[in-house]
Image (spheres, rainbow, N blue to C red):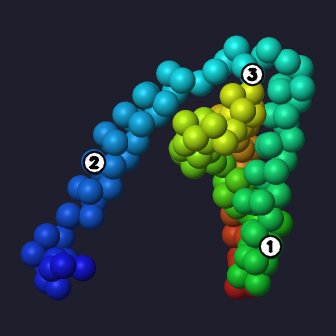
Amino acid sequence: MVDPDAERAHPRFHIKLEGLGYGFLVPVFFVTSGIQFDLDALFADAGTVLRVPLFLAALLLVRGLPVLAYRTVGLSRAELMAAGLLQATSLPFIVAATTIGLKLDAIQPDNAAALVAAGLVSVIVFPLVALPLLSRGRRSTDVRSVGKRE
């Protein structure tokens, strides 16, 4: 914004800035906050462990449901489900929010642990389920487009 000629003068600046952020700053944040993940609080009570699937379902609902807006784009059902799962993956925001919430005493440690665990599960499980759906959706789209050409 400051340099009106930035794209021409520094064409790789944004790529380098993203590389610094994702390659250095984000991992440092996760290492320092990950050390504070309270695994004992997660397993101290069965109710806390049972909140993990509840929070996971909430992630799917809140972050995955907006995929319905993509129906008009012409995506297949498998592609829509994959997009919903990929949109529902969330860890950085959850870690940041729970870290701040714990510092402000706005969230209980057991709830923070359950939220972070749900975020971890979403980052691990949702892409594993979504990627086969996405490739299946692409194959069905390719078959439909080949049929239209004939």
Quadrant of residue 107 within the rendered picture? top right
Within-10-Å neighbours for mark 2: few <14, some 14–19, many 20+: few
- Name the mark on residue 68: 1
Quadrant of residue 135 within the rendered picture? bottom right
Q: Does dot 1 land on a helix, a strand or a loop?
A: helix
Report if residue 32 is visible in the image. Answer: yes
Q: Amino acid at mark 2?
A: Leu
| N-term-proximal mark, 2 vs 1 | 2
| Residue denoted by label 2 | 20
Q: Amino acid at mark 3?
A: Leu
Q: Does dot 2 land on a helix, a strand or a loop?
A: helix
| Residue denoted by label 3 | 42
Contact check, label 3 and label 1, Cβ < 8 Å: no
Residue at x 33% of width, y 49% of height: 21
Measuring from the top left, give residue 110's x and y in whole percent.
Answer: 74, 27
Quadrant of residue 17 within the rendered picture? bottom left
Asked if residue 83 is positioned above or below residue 103 in the image, the reply reads below
| N-term-proximal mark, 3 vs 1 | 3
Measuring from the top left, give residue 134's x and y in whole percent.
Answer: 70, 56
| Location of the N terminus (image quadrant) | bottom left
Asked if residue 108 is positioned above or below residue 14 in the image, the reply reads above
Within-10-Å neighbours for mark 1: few <14, some 14–19, many 20+: few
Contact check, label 2 and label 1, Cβ < 8 Å: no
| N-term-proximal mark, 3 vs 2 | 2
